[in-house]
Amino acid sequence: MLSGIRVLDMATLAAAPLVATYLGEFGADVIKVEQPRGGDPIRTWGSQRDGVGLMWKSVSRNKRSVTLDLRQEQGQALLRRLAEQSDVVVANTRPQTLRGWGLDYQALRAVNDRLVMVHITGFGLTGPKSEQPGFGTLGEAMSGFAHITGEADGPPTLPPFMLADGVASLNAAYAVAMALYHRDVHGGGGQLIDVNLIDPLARLLEQTLLGYDQLGIVPTRAGNRWDISAPRNTYRTSDGRWLAMSGSSPTIALRVFHAIGRADLAADVDFADPQGRLARAAEVDQVVADWIAQRPLAEAMDVFERNQVAAAPVYDITQLVADPQLTHREVFVRIPDDELGAMTVQAPVARCSGAPGYVEHLGPRLGQHTDEVLGGLLGLTSNEIDGLRAAGVV
């Protein structure tokens, strides 16, 4: 679907590079620009196998790696030439640094007024914190997420994965798609997309804002419960497994009572009414927990599935990759790789019938495509590229 769109990924680590990853999964030509010495820090981030970063391999799928020292004028000039022939530039360098390099949106727009630039920063391009460094952890803290996550008597809880980065990248990716549509269909020209690591996650915590604004409620941590529905929790089975359940729909909640042999509760106004259930959420939880605790996971799930109750087992990674539903949908794909032999990664998420996403290859070696891009796209000769390499520009 994005064939013919060229993306220049000059960002590092997680949120911004993921935008280019998503675009590359649907056909965009993604050129990943890295510093000649070391490259993107995500190459050395997290688990490694034989010195190869596993997260790098996945996040940089379908990308071509080019090295340019953007601290040197020659590197900056080459980046501007690449931007001149690109549709999208992805960046996450601090604004003042990009301005100093002559690689901010205004400078790049001067060479390509059709350019869509997405700039992801910790706090945004405006405001008193705009020049401060930021990572996803700060977004998870400041968005309100950590404050409401965890047990009631425990500390604020951070997720052990890239939550703020991931949510920001998804918002930015659809913003790029809208900007390209605006440019190509409505003749709107290029534009700058400003995304930070706080706003997108805060946008998902809508209930906390609405309750505070209209009712003065400041939510506190309540474990796995949520004050919009009951039952809603994780429950331990007799064989030491866990399952999760949600009664967010009133009809689903009533099915729970029938499934566990408590039709009397479904007929009781205090339990049949959604607000009544919320007022007695602890009692509802206890009734459900007691029933589940007496049965192994397979038996409990069989009862709930037969009664159309919204319940699911809590998976670890071994169970996740073996699940028949996910296997049928090919959620995980095994991709050949010249460094690792092969690696299993997540497939593109959106299932598009006309032009599906794909993983052509995993993350390349540092600078693997420098000669190909600078020679093929910019027309540099082998001698010129050798000269740049000798000068440390590439």
Image: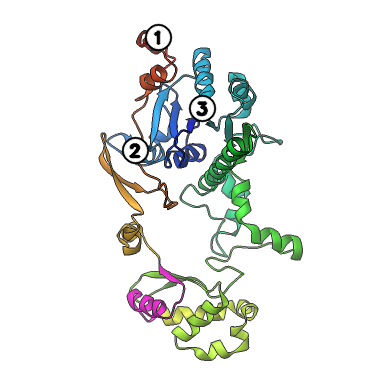
What percent of the width, then of the height, locates residue 143?
Answer: 62, 50
What percent of the width, then of the height, locates residue 212?
Answer: 72, 61
* Residue nearest the observer in this picture, 247 or 296: 247
Q: Nearer the viewer, mark 2 or mark 3?
A: 3
Residue at screen point 57% across, 54% down: 146
Say how many tags the image has: 3
Residue type, label 1: Glu
Mark before the other along the chain sequence, 1 or 3: 3
Instruction: State the mark number for residue 86.
Output: 3
* Residue nearest the observer in this picture, 227 or 118: 118
Residue 121 visible in image = no
159 left or right of 105 in image: left
Q: CA distance from mark 1 to mark 3?
A: 22 Å
Assign the C terminus to one quadrant of the image. Answer: top left
Residue type, label 3: Ser
Q: Residues within 10 Å of mark 2 (few under 14, many from 20)?
A: many
Image: magenta residue range: 293-313
Q: Nearer the viewer, mark 1 or mark 3?
A: 3
Q: Relative to 304, does residue 368 appear above or below in the rendering?
A: above
Residue at screen point 36% across, 26% down: 366
Residue 236's quadrant in the figure? bottom left
Q: CA distance from mark 2 to mark 3?
A: 22 Å
Residue type, label 2: Leu
Q: Which residue is mark 2?
A: 362
Q: Which residue is mark 1?
A: 384
Q: Relative to 70, does residue 350 appear above or below in the rendering?
A: below
* Residue nearest the observer in this picture, 393 or 9: 9
Residue 123 visible in image = yes
